Each structure stands twice: as structure tokens, then as C-alpha cells.
Image (cartoon, rainbow, N blue to C red):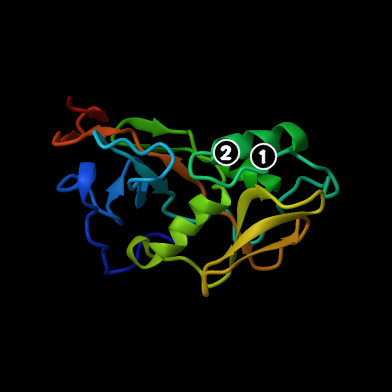
Amino acid sequence: MPAFQGTHYAQAAAGPCSGIISIGDAYQGGKVAYILQSGDPGYDANFCKGLIAATSDQSTGIRWDNGSDITTTEATETDIGTGPTNTNDIISSQGGAAGSYAAGICADYSVTEGGVTYDDWFLPSKDELYKLYINKAAIGGFANTYYWSSTEFSSTRALVQDMQYGGQLDMPKNNTAALGATAIHYSIPMEHGKVPDFTNGLILT
């Protein structure tokens, strides 16, 4: 997704993130894309946690695999919190030049902000990617096209997110036509009621 160009910000989430941070805020090298809610995997009522989206697409037309499009990678996880596992499974299976396929280019992404380097990015799972779709107006700049998830559907197909209409479907792994890839990473948890201190990239506790 391009640099943030939107004007709408979603209402701040209740609970541990209330009064701390909102969807669409610039934070930890990207934009706050989703804030964990009660019932989400990894939710903790005492800490503000969420997903951070990169401020630009890592690609606007890239294949899911690295040339081995009939290989099962075991990257079949779907839940929030499973994007890194899927991404690592894909890279372990596919290898090769990081810039030639979606998981590799996302994992290779790095940004330094305020003297802190954020290099823990990954290709989101299908559920993580759907949260970006839900909040796309607040995050800003998504193209009305399909984006790869890190969730494998079969030995030859993987799941994509339609950023225009919201559907998810499977496509051939070697497809590059209008298929984007955007990286995310998990925010550093902030204790409820504490204010983030960006001076040294740390959180005051």
C-alpha cells in the first residue's frame, strides 16, 4: 500500500488500548492496522497489542512461490499470530532470492525510525490480512486489487484477499497479475494506562 493518504481514522479501541493508540496512527515503522480485541489469539486485557502495516506495498505484482509452484510448504495456518510461522515455512521451502516472491520480500523488509530498526516483518496470514481489509480506510492507500496472504491452500494455490470487495479466494501460486504483497509486524505490547516513550524506541513501564 502507498504512503498514507487517507483522512479517516477509526475510533480508538476500548480496553487496554483506550487512550493510548488508534487505528491509522503512525507507529513502530508503519501504521497501526488492527488492535487485538477480546477473543483474538494473543489478546491480553493488561496490554495493548496490535498489527502494524508497512507504509507502502512491498510489491504490486509478485508470485507467491519462488518457482516451485507445485510444492506444499506446510504454511497452512490462518489465525492472527500465525503469519510469522507461515512466512518462515514458505522461505524454508522456497529459499532463493528474497525479492522474487511474496513471503521473501516481506521478510526482507526493514525500516529504521527514531533510531530503532524494525526488521521483524512478515507476510500476513489470511485472518491477519482480513483485519487490514476491515480497517483499510483508516490505514489508507490500499489498491483495489488482490493481496497475497501467507496461507497456503494447496500444493499449487494460496489464499488472497480482495481489497476492493472483501472476499478471500485461492489463486495459482505463480500468478503475478495485479497481486500485491504488504508486510506487517506485531507491535511491542504497551501496558494499559502507560504512555509510549519514543525517545529511545522503548515503552515506559
Q: Nearer the viewer, mark 1 or mark 2?
A: 2
Residue in the picture at 55% in, 36% down: 84
Mark count: 2
Residue in the picture at 52% in, 75% down: 165
Of residues 78 and 114, the one nearer the viewer is 78
Of residues 165 and 68, the one nearer the viewer is 165
Q: Within 10 Å of the Cα at label 1, are there few (<14), some (14-19), or many (20+) other Cα atoms?
A: some
Residue in the picture at 26% in, 63% down: 9
Residue located beneath label 1 in the image: 98
Residue located beneath label 2 in the image: 107
Q: Are marks 1 and 2 in contact (CB under 8 Å)?
A: yes
**Earlier sequence position, callout 1 versus callout 2:** 1
* Residue 147, position as x, y percentages in the image: 59, 60
Q: Residue furthest top?
A: 205
Residue type at mark 1? Ala
Residue type at mark 2? Ala
SS assignment at label 2:
helix
* Residue 1, position as x, y percentages in the image: 47, 60
**What separation in Å lies between label 1 and label 2 (alpha carbons)?**
8 Å
